[in-house]
Amino acid sequence: MSETRNVFISHVHEDDRHLGRLKELLADRGLDIRDSSVNASTPNDAKDPDYIKHQILAPKIRWAGTMIVLISPDTKDSVYVDWEIQYAVNTDTRVVGVFAPGASDSDLPDGLTDYADGIVGWNGDRILDAIQGGDVWQDSSGAPRARKDIARHNC
């Protein structure tokens, strides 16, 4: 039986190449994701960072029930990824970190370390479990990692 979920995949454009395979991993497990993220197939020509954040990204994150943060070496220092994580937390959107192939533990964005609902390796079963609300915490190799308890406080 197939299930459909609305997600926003937070990533840097250099990692667009992983989006199709991520969707395939989930589709192979019966989860069809509708992705609202901005990527090479849905570009925007906006230049103003506030406009991009509040008029383009915010509605897409609100629409999604889950945000997947694709963890890679370029993700850690992305101002937009950090903002997207904070916005998702403030709107009670589930935040799941997924290590892209070749990513390491040192690539975790600070916001994800502080606010993720789960962090998993590049494994379809674990990604699906985390999206569906499982309490899954792994390092970049897929080995168990200590869970970080977080308290969310909306303003």
Image: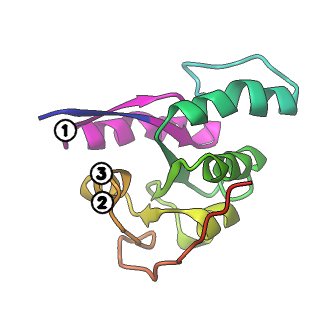
Tell me whether circle 3 and circle 2 mark residues in contact (CB < 8 Å). yes
Q: For residue 79, which numbered disc appears in the image?
A: none
Tell me which numbered mark, 1 or 2, is placed earlier along the sequence: 1
* Residue placed under numbered mark 1 in the picture: 30
Q: Along the horizontal axis of the image, is 47 left or right of 43? A: right
Q: Is residue 117 magenta?
A: no
Q: What residue sits 57% from the left and 55% below the top? A: 72
Spatial CA span between label 1 and label 3: 9 Å
Image: magenta residue range: 7-36
Which element is circle 2 on?
helix
Which element is circle 3 on?
helix
Q: Along the horizontal axis of the image, is 144 left or right of 38? A: left
* Residue placed under numbered mark 2 in the picture: 126
Percent position (x, y) of residue 18?
A: 45, 41
Q: What residue sits 53% from the left and 47% below the top? A: 93
Please give the count of numbered marks on the rendered protein: 3
In which quadrant of the rendered image does the N terminus lie? top left
Q: Residues within 10 Å of mark 3 (few under 14, many from 20)?
A: some
What amino acid type is highlighted by mark number 3?
Leu
Percent position (x, y) of residue 5?
A: 35, 35
Q: Is residue 29 magenta?
A: yes
* Residue placed under numbered mark 3 in the picture: 128
User: In this rendering, is residue 144 above or below 133?
Assistant: below
What amino acid type is highlighted by mark number 2?
Arg
